[in-house]
Amino acid sequence: AQSVTQPDIHITVSEGASLELRCNYSYGATPYLFWYVQSPGQGLQLLLKYFSGDTLVQGIKGFEAEFKRSQSSFNLRKPSVHWSDAAEYFCAALMTYGNKLVFGAGTILRVKS
Amino acid sequence: NAGVTQTPKFQVLKTGQSMTLQCAQDMNHNSMYWYRQDPGMGLRLIYYSASEGTTDKGEVPNGYNVSRLNKREFSLRLESAAPSQTSVYFCASSKGSSNQPQHFGDGTRLSIL
Protein backbone atom coordinates (compact mmCIF):
# COMPACT_ATOMS: atom_id res chain seq x y z
CA ALA A 1 0.00 0.00 0.00
CA GLN A 2 1.10 3.51 -0.69
CA SER A 3 2.44 5.33 2.34
CA VAL A 4 4.30 8.48 3.32
CA THR A 5 6.67 8.56 6.27
CA GLN A 6 7.93 11.60 8.11
CA PRO A 7 10.45 10.20 10.59
CA ASP A 8 10.67 13.28 12.80
CA ILE A 9 7.66 14.16 14.93
CA HIS A 10 9.27 17.31 16.35
CA ILE A 11 12.22 19.40 15.24
CA THR A 12 13.63 22.45 16.99
CA VAL A 13 16.00 24.83 15.22
CA SER A 14 17.42 28.20 16.08
CA GLU A 15 16.26 31.21 14.16
CA GLY A 16 18.61 31.78 11.23
CA ALA A 17 19.75 28.16 11.12
CA SER A 18 19.13 25.88 8.17
CA LEU A 19 16.31 23.37 8.13
CA GLU A 20 15.70 19.98 6.57
CA LEU A 21 12.50 18.02 7.09
CA ARG A 22 12.54 14.43 5.91
CA CYS A 23 9.92 12.63 3.88
CA ASN A 24 9.98 9.13 2.39
CA TYR A 25 7.31 7.53 0.26
CA SER A 26 6.37 4.03 -0.71
CA TYR A 27 4.68 3.83 -4.06
CA GLY A 28 4.72 1.63 -7.13
CA ALA A 29 5.67 4.45 -9.42
CA THR A 30 6.97 7.97 -9.02
CA PRO A 31 4.11 9.79 -7.33
CA TYR A 32 3.21 13.40 -7.41
CA LEU A 33 4.60 14.87 -4.19
CA PHE A 34 3.61 17.85 -2.11
CA TRP A 35 4.60 19.72 1.01
CA TYR A 36 1.94 21.55 3.00
CA VAL A 37 2.28 23.79 6.06
CA GLN A 38 -0.31 24.20 8.78
CA SER A 39 -0.20 27.07 11.26
CA PRO A 40 -2.09 26.58 14.54
CA GLY A 41 -5.84 26.73 14.05
CA GLN A 42 -5.51 27.04 10.30
CA GLY A 43 -5.98 24.86 7.28
CA LEU A 44 -3.19 23.49 5.12
CA GLN A 45 -1.31 25.74 2.73
CA LEU A 46 0.59 24.34 -0.22
CA LEU A 47 4.33 25.09 -0.08
CA LEU A 48 5.48 23.30 -3.22
CA LYS A 49 4.85 20.34 -5.49
CA TYR A 50 6.80 17.91 -7.65
CA PHE A 51 5.37 16.23 -10.69
CA SER A 52 8.30 15.57 -13.01
CA GLY A 53 11.38 17.21 -14.48
CA ASP A 54 13.85 19.14 -12.37
CA THR A 55 14.27 17.28 -9.10
CA LEU A 56 14.87 20.47 -7.11
CA VAL A 57 11.65 22.45 -6.78
CA GLN A 58 11.18 25.88 -5.36
CA GLY A 59 8.21 26.88 -3.28
CA ILE A 60 6.80 29.79 -1.40
CA LYS A 61 8.31 31.39 1.70
CA GLY A 62 11.85 30.46 0.64
CA PHE A 63 11.34 26.69 0.85
CA GLU A 64 12.68 24.14 -1.58
CA ALA A 65 12.53 20.37 -1.82
CA GLU A 66 14.59 17.78 -3.62
CA PHE A 67 13.20 14.60 -5.10
CA LYS A 68 15.58 11.64 -4.94
CA ARG A 69 14.22 8.58 -6.70
CA SER A 70 16.99 6.29 -5.45
CA GLN A 71 16.11 7.10 -1.85
CA SER A 72 12.34 7.47 -2.33
CA SER A 73 12.68 10.79 -0.59
CA PHE A 74 11.35 14.30 -0.96
CA ASN A 75 13.01 16.36 1.77
CA LEU A 76 12.04 19.96 2.47
CA ARG A 77 14.75 22.54 3.07
CA LYS A 78 15.17 26.17 3.97
CA PRO A 79 18.57 27.87 4.28
CA SER A 80 17.59 30.27 7.09
CA VAL A 81 14.58 29.72 9.31
CA HIS A 82 12.45 32.58 10.60
CA TRP A 83 10.37 32.49 13.77
CA SER A 84 7.24 32.70 11.62
CA ASP A 85 8.11 29.30 10.11
CA ALA A 86 7.08 27.57 13.33
CA ALA A 87 4.20 25.32 12.25
CA GLU A 88 3.41 21.74 11.37
CA TYR A 89 4.60 20.45 8.01
CA PHE A 90 3.01 17.65 6.06
CA CYS A 91 4.43 15.69 3.17
CA ALA A 92 1.87 14.09 0.86
CA ALA A 93 1.83 11.81 -2.17
CA LEU A 94 -0.91 11.73 -4.76
CA MET A 95 -2.54 8.48 -5.74
CA THR A 96 -3.48 9.17 -9.31
CA TYR A 97 -6.67 7.09 -9.18
CA GLY A 98 -9.33 9.27 -7.65
CA ASN A 99 -6.83 12.05 -7.14
CA LYS A 100 -6.38 10.99 -3.50
CA LEU A 101 -3.65 12.38 -1.29
CA VAL A 102 -1.82 10.21 1.22
CA PHE A 103 -0.33 12.25 4.05
CA GLY A 104 2.56 11.68 6.36
CA ALA A 105 1.98 12.09 10.10
CA GLY A 106 3.50 15.56 10.11
CA THR A 107 6.56 17.24 11.63
CA ILE A 108 6.13 20.01 14.17
CA LEU A 109 8.77 22.69 13.76
CA ARG A 110 9.73 24.84 16.70
CA VAL A 111 11.97 27.86 16.22
CA LYS A 112 13.97 29.16 19.14
CA SER A 113 15.39 32.65 19.29
CA ASN B 1 -11.18 35.05 -2.59
CA ALA B 2 -13.06 32.77 -0.17
CA GLY B 3 -11.66 29.49 -1.54
CA VAL B 4 -12.97 26.62 0.60
CA THR B 5 -15.39 27.56 3.36
CA GLN B 6 -16.31 25.21 6.19
CA THR B 7 -19.08 25.65 8.72
CA PRO B 8 -19.23 25.48 11.63
CA LYS B 9 -15.71 26.15 12.90
CA PHE B 10 -16.36 24.55 16.28
CA GLN B 11 -19.00 22.12 17.54
CA VAL B 12 -19.58 20.07 20.65
CA LEU B 13 -21.95 17.12 20.47
CA LYS B 14 -23.20 14.48 22.83
CA THR B 15 -22.75 10.83 21.97
CA GLY B 16 -25.55 9.69 19.67
CA GLN B 17 -26.39 13.12 18.28
CA SER B 18 -26.30 13.76 14.55
CA MET B 19 -24.49 16.56 12.80
CA THR B 20 -23.79 17.77 9.28
CA LEU B 21 -20.58 19.60 8.44
CA GLN B 22 -20.87 21.93 5.50
CA CYS B 23 -18.27 22.71 2.87
CA ALA B 24 -18.46 25.02 -0.13
CA GLN B 25 -15.86 26.06 -2.69
CA ASP B 26 -16.01 28.93 -5.14
CA MET B 27 -13.15 27.90 -7.42
CA ASN B 28 -15.25 25.83 -9.84
CA HIS B 29 -13.36 22.72 -8.80
CA ASN B 30 -14.57 19.31 -9.86
CA SER B 31 -13.24 17.23 -6.96
CA MET B 32 -13.92 17.60 -3.25
CA TYR B 33 -12.66 15.74 -0.21
CA TRP B 34 -13.27 15.26 3.49
CA TYR B 35 -10.38 14.46 5.82
CA ARG B 36 -10.01 14.04 9.53
CA GLN B 37 -6.87 15.08 11.36
CA ASP B 38 -5.80 13.37 14.57
CA PRO B 39 -2.55 13.94 16.49
CA GLY B 40 0.34 11.92 15.11
CA MET B 41 -1.70 10.53 12.22
CA GLY B 42 -1.65 13.28 9.66
CA LEU B 43 -4.79 13.66 7.57
CA ARG B 44 -6.85 10.64 6.63
CA LEU B 45 -9.35 10.64 3.81
CA ILE B 46 -12.93 9.93 4.85
CA TYR B 47 -14.81 10.36 1.56
CA TYR B 48 -14.22 12.09 -1.70
CA SER B 49 -16.17 13.19 -4.72
CA ALA B 50 -14.21 13.06 -7.95
CA SER B 51 -16.93 14.98 -9.78
CA GLU B 52 -20.45 16.21 -9.26
CA GLY B 53 -22.79 13.27 -8.80
CA THR B 54 -20.16 10.80 -7.58
CA THR B 55 -18.86 9.92 -4.14
CA ASP B 56 -16.42 7.25 -2.99
CA LYS B 57 -15.09 5.94 0.27
CA GLY B 58 -11.65 6.90 1.45
CA GLU B 59 -9.50 5.34 4.13
CA VAL B 60 -11.80 5.84 7.16
CA PRO B 61 -15.45 6.07 5.99
CA ASN B 62 -17.18 4.17 8.81
CA GLY B 63 -19.65 6.28 10.77
CA TYR B 64 -19.91 8.95 8.07
CA ASN B 65 -22.00 9.77 5.05
CA VAL B 66 -21.54 12.43 2.42
CA SER B 67 -23.62 14.32 -0.09
CA ARG B 68 -22.33 16.16 -3.13
CA LEU B 69 -25.19 18.60 -3.26
CA ASN B 70 -23.95 20.39 -6.38
CA LYS B 71 -20.59 21.31 -7.83
CA ARG B 72 -19.90 23.82 -5.06
CA GLU B 73 -21.03 21.94 -1.96
CA PHE B 74 -19.97 18.71 -0.28
CA SER B 75 -21.38 17.89 3.14
CA LEU B 76 -20.29 15.34 5.73
CA ARG B 77 -22.84 13.78 8.06
CA LEU B 78 -22.37 11.98 11.34
CA GLU B 79 -25.60 10.07 11.94
CA SER B 80 -24.82 8.96 15.49
CA ALA B 81 -21.73 10.68 16.85
CA ALA B 82 -19.23 8.68 18.89
CA PRO B 83 -16.33 9.94 21.04
CA SER B 84 -13.90 8.34 18.55
CA GLN B 85 -15.09 10.88 16.01
CA THR B 86 -13.67 13.75 18.05
CA SER B 87 -11.28 15.29 15.57
CA VAL B 88 -10.55 18.22 13.32
CA TYR B 89 -12.27 17.85 9.98
CA PHE B 90 -10.95 19.41 6.81
CA CYS B 91 -12.64 19.85 3.50
CA ALA B 92 -10.57 20.27 0.35
CA SER B 93 -11.14 20.75 -3.34
CA SER B 94 -9.15 20.44 -6.53
CA LYS B 95 -9.68 20.87 -10.24
CA GLY B 96 -9.65 17.11 -10.49
CA SER B 97 -6.80 16.35 -12.80
CA SER B 98 -3.96 14.58 -11.09
CA ASN B 99 -1.43 17.39 -11.35
CA GLN B 100 -3.56 19.94 -9.57
CA PRO B 101 -3.08 20.51 -5.85
CA GLN B 102 -5.83 20.40 -3.29
CA HIS B 103 -6.98 23.55 -1.53
CA PHE B 104 -8.06 23.26 2.09
CA GLY B 105 -10.59 24.97 4.31
CA ASP B 106 -9.73 26.13 7.82
CA GLY B 107 -11.26 23.09 9.48
CA THR B 108 -14.09 22.20 11.84
CA ARG B 109 -13.10 21.27 15.37
CA LEU B 110 -15.58 18.68 16.59
CA SER B 111 -15.76 17.30 20.13
CA ILE B 112 -18.03 14.38 21.03
CA LEU B 113 -18.75 14.03 24.74
Image: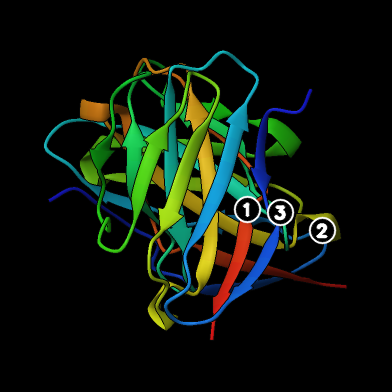
Chain label for disc 1: B
State which tag comes first along the sequence, 2 or 3. 2
> Measuring 42% from the left and 77% from the top, which residue is drawn there?
B16
Q: Residue under label 1, please give it.
A: B107
- Asked which quadrant contains residue A13, the reply is bottom right
Residue A65 visible in the current orientation? yes
Distance from disc 1 to disc 2, alpha carbons, whole Å, reads 31 Å
Q: Residues within 10 Å of mark 2 (few under 14, many from 20)?
A: some
Q: Position of residue A74 (x, y in %)?
A: 40, 43
Q: Residue under label 3, please give it.
A: A42
Q: Is residue A54 above or below residue B93?
A: above
Q: Residues within 10 Å of mark 3 (few under 14, many from 20)?
A: some
- Asked which quadrant contains residue A45, the reply is top right
Q: Quadrant of the C terminus of chain A?
A: bottom right
Q: Is residue B86 above or below residue B54?
A: below
Could you say which is closer to the camera, residue B8 or residue B38? B8
Q: Are marks 1 and 3 on the same chain?
A: no
- Say the numbered circle drawn on residue A16: 2
Q: Position of residue B85 (x, y in %)?
A: 42, 72
Q: Disc 1, disc 3: CB below 8 Å?
A: yes
Q: Is residue A12 above or below residue A92?
A: below
Chain label for disc 3: A
